[in-house]
Structures are given as structure tokens and as C-alpha cells.
Amino acid sequence: MKKNKLSFNVIEVPLDFLFLLIAGITAYFLRFADFVVAYRPIIFELPLSLFLKILLGVSIGAIIIFTFSGLYSFKRKTLTQKISKVFSSTSFFILILIIAFFFNQRLFSSRFIVLFYWAFSLILLSLERIILNLVHHYLTRKGVIKSNIVIIGQNDSNQNLIQELKSNKNLGYQVIQSFPELNLKFFDFLEEIDRENEIDEIFLMNTLADRNLINTLINFCNSHHIVYKYTASLLETKIINFEINTIAGVPIVEIKGTRLDGWARVWKRVYDLVLTIFSLVLFIPIYIVVGIFIKLDSSGPVLVKLTRVGAKNKKFKMYKFRSMVVGADKMKKDLMSQNEREDGPLFKMKDDPRITKVGKFIRKTSIDELPQLINVLKGNISLVGPRAHEPGEVAKYDDRDLKLLAIKPGITGMAQVSGRSDLKFSEEVRLDIYYIENWNIWLDIKIILKTVKVVLFDKNAV
């Protein structure tokens, strides 16, 4: 469901760009039509080739302005609100365009084309949203786009809301289970339900439930990447990132688990792919040389696939250059007594006998982690994020630690560049949770640049 919703919003960008080009070309040919020329003679020269170059740049600029004006916001909006936003965003863009052409009239001097470009853009972008809205409603009613929800708590005042969620297919909700109250037994059922039918949202109708249980529920939602919503009341909690909507006249508050929702997730994925593809090509010589040395140093494969836990507690295979002897995982049990980490669930041993000679070098320089770029391409991890841990380690997480599973893990992260392996587990968690709650693109760029510095100059990097 979530990917369907995300794709439906993202498709507006290329469609807008296409229709802006169509609007501009239509305005151009209309200006040079015989019946228009007869009324308004042409007193300027504007070859089609030059116009297309200008139109391409202008349309790209329009998309950028539309983005910053909030036209592509993922916040739920009615069709009227969408068309109103199209009008205000397009008009603002045309105003900037007119000002730009005023200061450079040699570049463009046809007010007719600008005026009709604005008119055609309004018509086409509005029609686009009307059609997309109709398609969205159709797919929602057919159950293609839907949110699987679990409802907790029922009373007389909430029956209208529950009935509306179940009966109104246009809302896009499918109630897969409801519970009369929030209690400890509920969480066992919830785990089972989430495995059988992936839960998208949980509605808490009874905000007078035990506060400890509510906190446990919020942690569960964060770790399983489930949207948590509750009926508005005097719930005493500090909320930084939230959104309020109404269903059947009942105010519904949605607590945003992370900043990586909507377009933020799209942008992060885009630059992940761009940087990863560039890096994979750049590091080809390193892959070849390291692969040869690993083969010469010890028997076994060049790459290993290690089971790790990612977003929503889902397991995946992480690629790394092999730095240990074959069968190292089986030897770990015998070495647990020598674990140098006294806090948290992680294992660390300074002179680990399982590590090969080449393995010590590629670990020291972090070269062993380069194959994780394959995982980034596959979408298992991101370039920047919390460290990915083993299933056995994740099983020992407490409620606070589970928030690390709210987003994709990363090849590098705040914990890795802020002390690396010298950090205590509790400090790692604190830094990674800070990253999750305060994410922005510039923070990712700073972490990536600092990672390069740490790998090249920090002798303690592991």
C-alpha cells in the first residue's frame, strides 16, 4: 500500500513536466497560427529550436518552484485544494518568469506566448489532477490502494468512526482486526497479525489506556514502521512531528515516527542511487585487487552474505568482503566469554582469531564494507543510517533500541563517525536516534564527508 501511495504522488512530477512542455509548445504554435498573426502581426524572431531550449529550462525551473511551494506535498488534500494549489503555484511561477524576461528581453519578448503558456499550464495541470484523482478513487475502491489498519478500543462515541472506516471504501482503509482494549496480551496478537497481513496503521481509540502500554505501542509502531494514530483528546504527550485530519467528524492525530516520509524518502533514495552507481564504477579496480588478495590469503569466497536486520525488523543478506576464515559464525559461541563489550548486545574482540591477515587490513580501512553498495542498489540499506545488526543482537534490544528499525540501516552513520567502535552501545543508540529524529539531506552529506575523513585519517577506525 505505502509504495502504491508513494508512487501515485511521485508520478505527478514527470507528468507536470510533460504537460508544461505541451503547454509551451501549444502556446508557441498558436502564436504563429494564421488567424492570430492576422490579428497580431509578428514583430520578433523566435525560431522553434531556440524556443524549445528556453522552454526546457523554464519547465525545469517550474518544477523546482512547484516543489518548494508545496505542490508535491504528501499531506492529504481534497481535489479543490489541489487545484487551488496548482493555480497559486503556477501563477507565482509565471510572475517570476515575467520578471526574469523583463530584465532580459532579448531572450524572450512575446507576452502572448507567456500568457497562453500560463493558461494552458493551468488547464492541463488541473485536468491531470482531476484524472489522477478519479484513478486514485477507482483503485482505492477496488482495494489496489489501501491501508491495512488495526483498531484498538471501542466505545459509543467512536462507533461512528469505526463504521465509517469499515464502510467508506473511498477512505482506502481495510480494518483487518479490532480489539476492545489495550493490554499486554494484545502485543502477542499484533505480532502474529503483522506477519500474516502487513499492518500499515494502528488507530488507538481509547487514549485513557495505561501510559506505559501506550508507550510500548508507539515503540512497536516505530520499530515495525507502522503509522500510529489516535483520536484527539487530552493525551498528555510532547509531540514534535504530527498531522491532524478528521474522519466522520472525529479529529485523528497521526504521530510521524521519522522525518523520512513522503518526498524526503524519495530524495534520499534518489541520491543514494546516484552516489552508489558512481561509487561502484569508481571502485572497480579496488574490487579486483582486494578479491585477488583475499583468494591468495585464505580459502573461501571473496564475498560473504551476512544476515542482518533492516527497517521494519525485516531480515536481509548484507554483502561484505570476507575478512574472516570460513565457518567464523560457528566459532563465535566459543569466543563469547572473551567479549570486550560490557554494555548492549554487540560482540567485539580486539584480537579475534577468526580474522585473516588481509581481513585485518580491509577492516582497518573499511574496504570490507564496499560491497554493501550492492545492498544500497537493491534497496536493503541506505548510504547513511543506523548500523545494521545481527538478528541475535536485535533480539536483545530494549524498547528504546527498537526505534533504530524505523528506517533503513546505512553503510555509515552518526555512530560510525563519532567514535566508531570505541562508542558504548547506549551512545550508538542515542546518536542513531538523534539522526532518525533530525534527518535532513545536509546531515547526510556531512556524515558522508566525515566518513571519508575518518577512514583516511583515523587510526582507530575499524
Image (cartoon, rainbow, N blue to C red):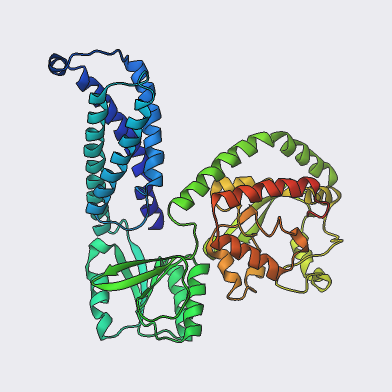
Decide if residue 442 is on the left or right side of residue 82: right
Q: Which corner quadrant of the image does residue 108 belong to?
A: top left
Q: Is residue 361 visible?
A: yes
- What quarter of the picture does the N terminus occupy? bottom left
Q: Is residue 366 visible?
A: no
In this view of the protein, which residue sits in the foreground, 86 or 250?
86
Residue 336 in the image, given as x and y percentages of width and height: 79, 71
- What quarter of the picture does the C terminus occupy? bottom right
Whether residue 260 is situated above or below residue 17 in the rendered picture: below
Residue 85 in the image, given as x and y percentages of width and height: 29, 48
Decide if residue 138 is on the left or right side of residue 335: left
Q: Which corner quadrant of the image does residue 297 belong to?
A: top right
Decide if residue 33 is on the left or right side of residue 278: left
| Residue under the image location 56 percent in, 61 percent down | 436
Residue 418 in the image, given as x and y percentages of width and height: 72, 58
Decide if residue 20 is on the left or right side of residue 286: left
Identity of the residue furthest to the front in this view: 103
Residue 439 in the image, given as x and y percentages of width and height: 55, 57
In this view of the protein, which residue sits in the foreground, 234 or 278?
234
| Residue under the image location 72 percent in, 45 percent down | 452
